[in-house]
Image: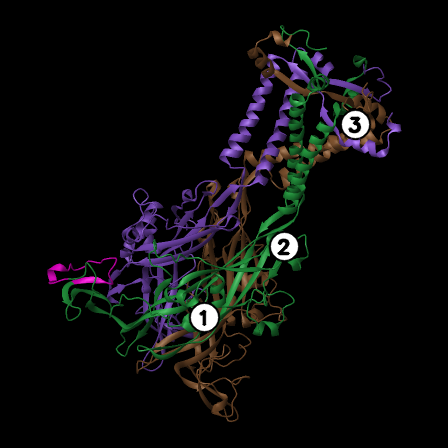
Chain colours: A brown, B purple, C green
Amino acid sequence: MMKTMGCCASICQCFFEYSTPKILVIRSFKVGTLNRITQALVIAYVIGYVCVLNKGYQDTDAVLSSVTTKVKGIALTNTSDLGLRIWDVADYVIPPQEESSFFVLTNLLITLNQTQSHCPEVPKTGFDCTSDRDCKAGSRDTRGNGVQTGKCVKYSAVDKTCEVLAWCPLELDKEPPNPPMLADAENFTVLIKNSIRYPKFNFNKRNILPYVNKTYLEQCVFNRITDPDCPIFRLKDMVTEANEDFQTMAVHGGVMGVQIRWECDLDMPSSWCVPRYTFRRLDNKDPVNNVAPGYNFRFAKYYKNGNNEETRTLIKGFGIRFDVMVFGQAGKFNIVPTLLNVGAGLALLGLVTVVCDWIVLTCMTKKNIYNEQKYSYVDDFQLLSNETP
Amino acid sequence: MMKTMGCCASICQCFFEYSTPKILVIRSFKVGTLNRITQALVIAYVIGYVCVLNKGYQDTDAVLSSVTTKVKGIALTNTSDLGLRIWDVADYVIPPQEESSFFVLTNLLITLNQTQSHCPEVPKTGFDCTSDRDCKAGSRDTRGNGVQTGKCVKYSAVDKTCEVLAWCPLELDKEPPNPPMLADAENFTVLIKNSIRYPKFNFNKRNILPYVNKTYLEQCVFNRITDPDCPIFRLKDMVTEANEDFQTMAVHGGVMGVQIRWECDLDMPSSWCVPRYTFRRLDNKDPVNNVAPGYNFRFAKYYKNGNNEETRTLIKGFGIRFDVMVFGQAGKFNIVPTLLNVGAGLALLGLVTVVCDWIVLTCMTKKNIYNEQKYSYVDDFQLLSNETP
Amino acid sequence: MMKTMGCCASICQCFFEYSTPKILVIRSFKVGTLNRITQALVIAYVIGYVCVLNKGYQDTDAVLSSVTTKVKGIALTNTSDLGLRIWDVADYVIPPQEESSFFVLTNLLITLNQTQSHCPEVPKTGFDCTSDRDCKAGSRDTRGNGVQTGKCVKYSAVDKTCEVLAWCPLELDKEPPNPPMLADAENFTVLIKNSIRYPKFNFNKRNILPYVNKTYLEQCVFNRITDPDCPIFRLKDMVTEANEDFQTMAVHGGVMGVQIRWECDLDMPSSWCVPRYTFRRLDNKDPVNNVAPGYNFRFAKYYKNGNNEETRTLIKGFGIRFDVMVFGQAGKFNIVPTLLNVGAGLALLGLVTVVCDWIVLTCMTKKNIYNEQKYSYVDDFQLLSNETP
């Protein structure tokens, strides 16, 4: 019959064929229930977990962010070195601007009027001496403050140490003042302006929300309950939210993370996409396996005296660095991840048949009937010639 | 028959079995056409959209980037405070180096010769007074510039304000000059050197492309049409590309995003992987719900006068911060995402059968014939004992 | 029979139905072997490659990181300008603190005692002149150092150049000293403290590992073989690991990437999640298509002289910027990606049937027998009325 048709007709016939598997329907309370339950589980998983909870139907994008900060506040210190002194933002924010972090000085060790000259090293193992023979000219120890001249000189009435060429007088190796000098820093406020962008979805937003007006911004301070959308933060509040004590942290300094999370479902109104602020201490305060605990760095202000000689004021500044970390992802419906998940879900439905078949064909009492109906055999083995019906 | 064989033979037989579903082929114009169209749709989707457009066969990696910048240019200002003055790169880039952004000073309010001393507060609500009783010694208002001494002193012929300990004279709370002082900044150029890396594919590239030579680099300026590969940008051009006016933006400052996008298909020649530059204003210029519009910060230069007293020049610097944002992803053929997508695509082909079966078995005129042929029944229910043929 | 049942019973019956495809089992050495091999390949791929190698069963998260650095060391320079001079950390780290990078000055060109005044331009094409007519008052060339006054003045015994208003004396346009001035910088050490977080898994860790104690940290230096967990790095070691010569790099400066990779399998003990340090030069040292090779920037120290005039020391600082780049991802078992991959794997198993069917039904000698057994036909075409048995 096939041979009488032309090749073209054969292809046509093939094209208009529809292949569908032959199905054995087993009508049974046990098997049916098992089947439906398994199906329900898989469908519930696909819809409930993948689609609803994990939003598997969405394409996602990572956030691009820009941050500017502006600290405000005045601190007063009273020390024997400096007398009564006011510190304003130009004094305590170092460097004056950074990309997405800011440093607030809270404590300091100051060494005034340093010049390039000779002076005895600070007494420490390795720098003590009794005569010039104990000192090696040109030696520069990484723990030292300068290059040894080879002389052994008096440091105090009792100690003699090697002389060094350095910025003299040397900084004294002592603990920072406690309570911290700029204890007032806890009342400083910082305005954090953050604008974000999800480039894949061409979506922009700022942390100053549209409904917030200028009057409110001029007097508000962030509070998780009463003012959760105010972008002005009191330093102490941020540290307290991270379960730390500001005054304790201020002594040796530290690093705080200001985390701004933008988790946005762009299938929803864009006004639902709001920043969530959390605060966390990033450095380790555990003194056990810690070198140089806290956060400090040295910087200097350079002057020239009347003789055109350079002098400097060395400051070992302890303080809190606030790193503003912006993260989060936006999701928006996209057909590709949807179909990927639906496809995987359908494939899982295939599992149902595998599981049920196994139970039906091995555990049920009528398994022989089912087997006979489900399977037909074509046999190639000579030793088994009459298996097929 | 089975019982006569050993267990081993039984396993062998099982191993060499090949199970294939029994298929009912329906030859029909309607059904066949429906089937082929649905199949074509699914295949077209999988190949066209997933593979070609979304490159579902590629593994992807995010970019690692390093940026250095170098600004060039000279500005001239002429003010009553400073006289004729030249500003070069060491004067207007603050801090002198940053990791992936740079700040160019465009406008400033300068307060010369400040010392730690006493002076009357700037007149503002809360600082006006008529007698000493209106001022509280030790009070430090966040809006104020220092700590009150408790005295009420003359600010001008008519005003009296509370005296403060502060850096005196105080900065005047006035608007920045318009036109901006460093209006010349629009002609500054910046060389942006960016080297990127896709660690997963061990691929490195720079934004100075291989064919670009030194002579060209010494005189070129980026232009989207004539010089799209020149990494030297005129500040005004960048601001103009973001649809902003440089001179207007320069007055209060702002934040510009210099976006470098590296979208690389590493299955293609690596020379096709080139950076795309776009420019966007990142801060909000809308004056409605905005505090501290623009971008400014305070910094100071510290001096010592003849009496070894510290004085400083306070500068409220307005300017444009350029954040260089490097993003993009590279894709390269990888078998895992390919098979993931092919697998999901095949699973979707399974949908075709589901859809066609439903139509064939419920809507077609010959549905009863199809049903009879497709389904066999094994019945467990006592009430239905003669359904199976 | 069906008609005698109520509608409810019909739905019930439908609910308790279990549909399973009818299967033709072909018992054949060839076909069976082919089938099992294809199956084995797919299963091996899914288990071996997707699950074991690519950990397809894990959900992943990108790292959030915080970095602080502390450089230590002393350098000695001896120049005609400055005499014998000590450089400590406050002198050579500029700016004193940055978020995740640090710059170490290794070489410099210093121009002392600049004031705002008039001086002849540096001789270069475009600035040479013979009379005042060659100079244009107010002209500011981007390659120049100031604004021309319109006068033509003597630069040296032989050269005349246009006079400019600038910070005078001008910086000489010369190559940086070789060997570099702060050659001692190779022995500087830097402590890098890095704390990371995987927010999705609420997992925190630091690069100072728990077993490391304070005594060890005070004297260790990173060495890939003997001290791979010490977070203190000698600058020279880092540069050497990147296959660069420190002294050569120090002359013109450069950018080094300190890459910290945290590749964490959180299904394993958290102590297995350790940082891996690698070092790479990020800028291009190839002199062919390179402008401004190396890394340098200008900064100034401002002074006031006895007449309250501002003077400055301009420093063109060459040095190495170390960018600390923290990357990596954590994986943890999650049911969604697992099922996604299992689903895709199962779908691929469907491929086995497609491939084997094609071979069996077209290439085997007994293909007609198999065809007859596998396919039944329902025919709609009038020309083919007796195909179905």
**CA gap, disc 3 to disc 2?**
43 Å
- Name the residue: 59% across, 35% down: A340
Find numbered disc 3 in the image and state the secondary structure of the residue it sits on: helix
Residue at (65% x, 53% y) in the render: C266
Mark 3 touches mark 2? (CB < 8 Å): no
Front residue (pair A13, A217): A13
- Foreground mark, 1 or 3, reads 1
Looking at the rendered structure, the kind of residue marked 2 is: Asn
**Which kind of residue does numbered mark 3 sit on?**
Gly
Q: Quadrant of residue C83?
A: bottom left
Crowding near the residue tagged with mark 3, few <14, some 14–19, many ≥20 C-alpha atoms within 10 Å = many
* Image quadrant containing the N terminus of chain C: top right
- Which residue is at the far front? A382
Q: Measured from the top left, where is residue B353 in percent x and y?
A: 65, 23
* Residue A54, picture quadrant: top right
Instruction: Measure how far apart labels 1 and 2 are at the Cα level.
Output: 39 Å
Identify residue for label 3.
A32
Q: Which residues are magenta?
A: C129-149
